[in-house]
Image (cartoon, rainbow, N blue to C red):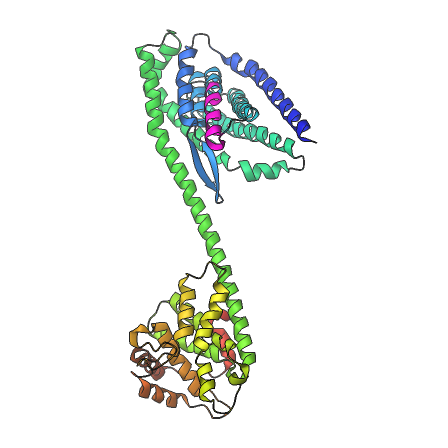
Amino acid sequence: MDKREKSLTHYLYILFLILLDIWLVRSVVLEHYSPDSPVVSLVIFFTILNILFGIKEVIILDNGIEKRYRFNFIINLIALLTCGPLVAYMSILIASLFYIPVNQFRRLGKVDIPSVFLHVLSLTISLNVMSLLFFQLGGQVFEPNFPYNVLAVLVGAIANFAVNTLVFSIWIYLYNFNTNLFRLIRKEFLWLLKYDLWQAIYAILIVNTVRLYFGDIYQQYTHGQSNIGSIELIILTGIIVVAFIFYYPIKERLVAFNLLINFKRQNADLTQLSHKLKQTNKRVIRAFISMLEKRDPYTSGHSERVALYSKTIARKLQLGESRCEMLEMAALLHDIGKMGVDINIINKQERLTDEEYDEIKKHPDYGVEILERIYRDSKQSEDYEFKLICDIANSHHERYDGKGYPKGISGEDISLEARIIGVADAIDAMTSDRPYRAGMTMEQALEELRKGCGTQFCPRVVEAVISYAKDNSLKIEKDSDISKMLSVFS
């Protein structure tokens, strides 16, 4: 179907809606028309209210998507319950012919005439269907008639939503016959139902409040004089005061409640996304560890052991659990810069020359470069975790007395995390076997920490290690046990 045929189809659809609306007016509206009622003044009043409530579109979040909603359905219900279908129909017809083009122009910068007619007809037809069901279910104008009025209003509100939704869904379907109507209704329109039902409930409350306080005056007005005067103004003022007192706070609470629900839903989605990102980061870390071990098989398990020692020390220092986990992640990548060092130097078994040792000393800077390349194209380059990993990769060989490398910083200028990993790295280096020497016992390693306390190592960290070692064993019996203790492998 080409564009011209689609336009013709839509015009025929609008013609059908007009004929349907006329038939419903004759069958419902005029059937319940009271000639004694001062229709003109009431239509003017409810038209003004309809415009005031309809011209203000509220932005509502639905699954993170901004959608527009008008809270004037309650005005149409109040008009129907207090004055009957003719006043409700005329007020919504006149008001919608005004506020729909205005809202459309304000939003799009133009007015689409077929779209305006579609919106107006959807409102009037759905109102007529709602009125028909209201009377069929025993509803009465301005009478309590409990519980029939309540049931009639709620069923009518659901019918109003259903007809309004169906009118628009068919319009969309005529653009694309492959559209799934049920999926479209569920995705695009179902969220409206809860707001229509809330407005129906509060319309009942408002009308019953008005009937309670202004019922006698209303009866005299609607069954007596036809010219608007002081009594009528009192009635109208009473209705509008009650409407504003009850409804405006309710509307704001409904919007706020919807925002709260959506923020909670988005927060849950962000939490899930954060979890997925953490799992991805863990897989990346495991991949880098595997690559490091292939380049330097003699240090197999080194990064994991350093991570476990570091986490143990951090907990002894009473750092928060989230900080301990980030420290663990950073410790696993502390030697990533060695991937930038010549593999022949990494695997050399003899004593290194000064030039080769200088090259080894560059691995902290290489580590930062590698990490920056990983995170450059993502939005994590400002994250605390990323900065922590970079800092540790660059500072874990700094000494407390300032004689370390690559920057020669000292004392508290070295981050606590880097000082912790510096000690953990030294413990594992001293207790691990090498081709050129056997590893120390843990007691010997602790004695070396005491000797280097205040010079090579941070006193606070050394004190925590020695204090922990008095009551617990720091020695890892099996590298296979590490996977059970580190979150990166969970």
Asked if residue 10 lies in the magenta stretch, the reply is no
Give the x, y percent position of residue 469: 36, 83
* Left or right: 95 in relation to 410: right
Q: Is residue 183 above or below residue 83?
A: below
Residue 83's quadrant in the figure? Answer: top left
Q: Is residue 260 above or below residue 423?
A: above
Residue drawn 39% across the image and 27% down it: 205
Name the quadrant of the N terminus: top right
Give the x, y percent position of residue 417: 37, 72
What is the count of numbered marks?
A: 0
Asked if residue 96 lies in the magenta stretch, the reply is yes
**Looking at this rendering, what residue extends furthest in the right direction?**
1
**Looking at this rendering, what residue extends furthest in the front direction?**
355
Residue drawn 36% across the image and 14% down it: 218
Per the rendered image, the range of residues in magenta is: 94-109
Dominant SS in magenta: helix
Q: Nearer the viewer, residue 193 or 358?
A: 358
Taking the image as drawn, is residue 300 in sight?
A: yes
Q: Nearer the viewer, residue 463 or 205?
A: 463
Q: Is residue 340 above or below residue 86?
A: below
Residue 231's quadrant in the figure? Answer: top left
Give the x, y percent position of residue 72: 43, 27
Taking the image as drawn, is residue 487 in sight?
A: no
